Amino acid sequence: MDPVEPRHSVSDDASDPDLPPPAAPPATVAAADPAVAAARPATGAGRRRRPPLTAVSVALVAVLAGSALFISGYSIGRQAAAEPGTAPSDEAAFQPFWDTYHTISDRYAGGAVDRGTVVQGAIKGMIDSLGDPFSQYLSADQYQQSLQGISGQFEGIGADIATHGSDGTDGCAPLGAACRLVVAKPLDGSPAARAGLLPGDVVLSVDGASLDGLTVDAARDRIRGPKGSVVTLAVQRGAGAPVSFTITRDVVQRKEVDSKDLAGGTVGYVSVTGFSDAAADAVVAALHDHIGAGRTRLILDLRGNPGGYVTAARKVASQFIGSGVLFWEQDAAGNQVETDALGGGVATDPSIRVVVLIDGGSASASEIVAGALQDTGRATLVGTQSYGKGTVQQWQELTGQGGAFKLTVARWLTPGKRWIHKVGLTPDVVVTVPQPLGPGSDPILARALEVLGGADPATGDVLRPAA
């Protein structure tokens, strides 16, 4: 399946919403499963051995969109190492690989051979040969960035950026006179916000270097950086002269949950844009506030949510489902294992009516939650067809600077054992969304309010979102 990009902008600092940064370098993180054995050649009296792999097992559900990696499941267990080797039955199949490797090592005359680079290239080639957009090799730096992004916390200036073409279209490339890099939104409380960057600001250069010819990802890589480092942006604002902003990068926590009341305070609304642990906690707190205020009609908005931790998805779904299966995992052998609700949820009382909003950008963890609530009859789904991501990946961390790879190892199924991969979830109430939308128009939210109550008890008017 050709992946799609659920969002139109990316963060300058967190292009890969992925796993949280570990307390120590990845090589020290424990692993749940045995390491994958590396191939070992047969050579005369013995066989050469390469260093063993250190495995980090990460169960995840992901959407790969361009360079962005959207994950919806994650777990870390104990560390393990395995004796590398090629099984006797596989020696013939692996012989061409080892012949090539040793020929490069022994005879390549074009310059010094970096063994680590050669090995990483081989690993990448193996993963790429699968033709699976959700299996991927990442360098050590890319892996670290992915580990940081999914937590909703990252290091940088804290601004969503996008590209805007001179013809008025978004998502252009490469950057140049006809395609500009713009600030979509500085994140609340971020260094970018404190420095005074505003939505619509055009970024002309970074540390004096032009961005012409770059992709948005390459531009983002120039802007982001570690906490305490400084970056200078030349910015065009309106018709004025370019302005220089010198910004000290910091740790930024992305706000993933928005909560408010609608329809004169009669409906509780919670929007979730990611599934980090912090987001799950914020959802629980928001639901506590709404239930405490006496609201028994709730809207959970998962539109445009590309995923996050499976643990966070489980926690969110468990706030509405008191017991039973939330989803299943099916491995390559067909074995199925269920994940049950945690119990003690805030909004499990069946008198509390729930509507979940989804669209084509709702993927992975969003679909786990929405699918669980739909199959159990706990909520009504309103909106458009969801993305359709139904496979589970496992991270395998490599030793040294080898980075890591993720491999599709299972499918996830809804409580009713539906596999929604490449299909998505069909809403109970399908809403046709006109294009373009008028200012302030939100037909999906308006329809959800109608489903929840029809009319405002105070005025008799059809429920509409509060301004």
Image (cartoon, rainbow, N blue to C red):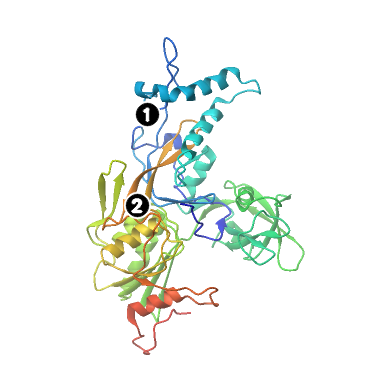
Q: Earlier in the sequence, mark 2 or mark 1?
A: 1
Give the spatial CA distance, label 2 vs label 1.
26 Å
**Residue 197 falls left or right of residue 34:** right
Q: Is residue 309 above or below residue 166?
A: above
In this figure, which residue is indicated by the disc labeled 1? 81
Give the residue at x 50% y 75%.
Answer: 434
The residue type indicated by label 2 comes to Thr
> Label 2 neighbourhood size at 10 Å, few (<14), some (14-19), many (20+)?
some
In this figure, which residue is indicated by the disc labeled 2? 311
Give the residue at x 42% y 74%.
Answer: 445
Q: Position of residue 154 (x, y in %)?
A: 52, 50
Frontmost residue, 89 versus 322: 89
Circle 2 SS class: helix
Give the residue at x 44% y 58%.
Answer: 274
The residue type indicated by label 1 comes to Ala
* Residue 266 showing in the rendered view: no
